[in-house]
Image: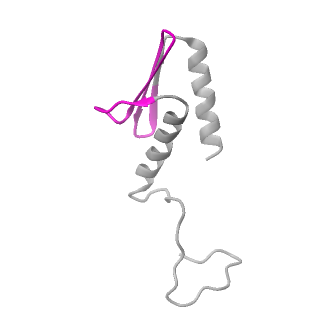
């Protein structure tokens, strides 16, 4: 790995600390899921304790479930407008990562 351009204080044996997981590393998937699950919890979903990839939201008679599997998300809801709202929120989340 080469030091980024503009970094002039690198000395032999010195290393750079990564602040993000790189794609393809062992922890990249764990970091992605941690960020995604914290987003779901932030927007009001509850993480199911028996299956950590399942998120549930219940509000005024409507029920939403999100199931995350690797890089796919299954979204089930009994309200079309809520599905559109969740899809828009996910788009903004992914766009601003």
At x 47%, y 28%, the residue is: 45
Residue 48 in picture, x, y percent from top left = 35, 30
At x 53%, y 38%, the residue is: 39
> Does residue 71 belong to the magenta stretch?
yes
At x 41%, y 34%, the residue is: 68
Image position of 84 (left or right of 67)? right
Q: Which sits in the foreground, 17 or 28?
A: 17
Q: Quadrant of residue 94?
A: top right
Asked if residue 4 is positioned above or below residue 55 in the image, the reply reads: below
Q: Quadrant of residue 16?
A: bottom right
**Furthest-left residue in view?**
50
Dominant SS of magenta comes to strand
Residue 72 in picture, x, y percent from top left = 45, 34
Residue 92 in picture, x, y percent from top left = 65, 36
Count of marks, rendered view? 0
**Furthest-bottom residue in view?**
12
Q: Which residues are magenta?
A: 46-74
Asked if residue 33 is positioned above or below residue 91 in the image, the reply reads: below
Asked if residue 28 is positioned above or below residue 70 in the image, the reply reads: below
Colour convention: one colour
> Does residue 6 belong to the magenta stretch?
no
């Amino acid at each position: 790995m080469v030091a980024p351009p503009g970094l002039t204080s690198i000395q032999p044996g010195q290393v750079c600390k990564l602040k993000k997981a790189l794609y393809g590393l062992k922890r990249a998937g764990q970091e992605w899921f941690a960020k995604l699950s914290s987003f779901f919890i932030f927007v009001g979903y509850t993480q199911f304790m028996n299956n950590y990839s399942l998120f549930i939201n219940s509000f005024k008679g409507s029920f939403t479930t999100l199931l995350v599997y690797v890089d796919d998300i299954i979204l089930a809801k009994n309200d079309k407008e809520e599905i559109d709202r969740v899809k828009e929120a996910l788009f903004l989340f992914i766009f601003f990562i």
